[in-house]
């Protein structure tokens, strides 16, 4: 089994995230591909919240995911971050929804590289319960 191309996995993760939000009863929509801003918008209590979706794929174990790249200089103003761990063998996603503050706590930058940064999967999993969308409340 081979992994999908990064762009293909990202597009799939965004589609799955949008479908999940809609299935939970939220009005949500995707930004057009290539548009500036964030990947999704979701309406919660008559307020539109921006959602940055980051998808990584794995074949056997979720621990194969070693990082979720996030450039906070351009994406750090998102209201929410939705990290998707996609089991490519079953096409089953696991979602981790974090607030902006939580994502900033999980983020690490390389001081030697100006345009770098990652949210560490171990920190994300320690911060958010899998498939818990309580941050939308």
Image (spheres, rainbow, N blue to C red):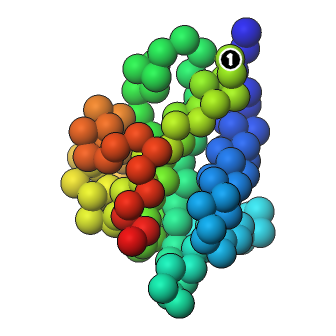
Q: Nearer the viewer, residue 123 or 23?
A: 23
Total number of numbered labels?
1
**40 or 28: which is nearer to us?**
28
Which residue occupies the foreground of this view, 20 or 84? Answer: 20
For this rendering, which residue is in front, 92 or 11? 92
Q: Is residue 21 visible?
A: no
Q: Quadrant of the N terminus?
A: top right
When the figure is inspected, residue 122 is found, relative to residue 130, above or below; the finding is: above
Horizontally, is 21 left or right of 134 in the view?
A: right
Q: Residue 56 occupies which quadrant of the picture?
A: top right
In this view, 69 is above or below 48:
above
Q: Position of residue 127 (x, y in %)?
A: 26, 46
98 lies above or below 83:
below
Residue bearing mark 1: 89
Q: For residue 34, which quarter of the picture?
A: bottom right
Q: Position of residue 111 (x, y in %)?
A: 24, 46
């Amino acid at each position: 089994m081979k992994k999908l191309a990064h762009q293909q996995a990202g597009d799939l993760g965004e589609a799955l995230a949008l479908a999940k939000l809609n299935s939970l009863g939220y009005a949500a929509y995707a930004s057009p591909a290539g548009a500036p801003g964030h990947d999704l918008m979701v309406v919660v209590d008559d307020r539109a919240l921006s959602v940055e979706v980051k998808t990584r794929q794995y074949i056997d174990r979720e621990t194969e995911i070693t990082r979720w790249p996030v450039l906070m200089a351009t994406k750090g103003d998102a209201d929410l971050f939705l990290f998707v761990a996609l089991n490519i063998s079953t096409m089953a996603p696991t979602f981790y929804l974090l607030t902006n503050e939580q994502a900033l706590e999980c983020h690490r930058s390389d001081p030697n590289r100006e345009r770098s940064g990652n949210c560490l999967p171990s920190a994300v999993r320690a911060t958010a319960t899998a498939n818990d969308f309580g941050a939308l409340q």
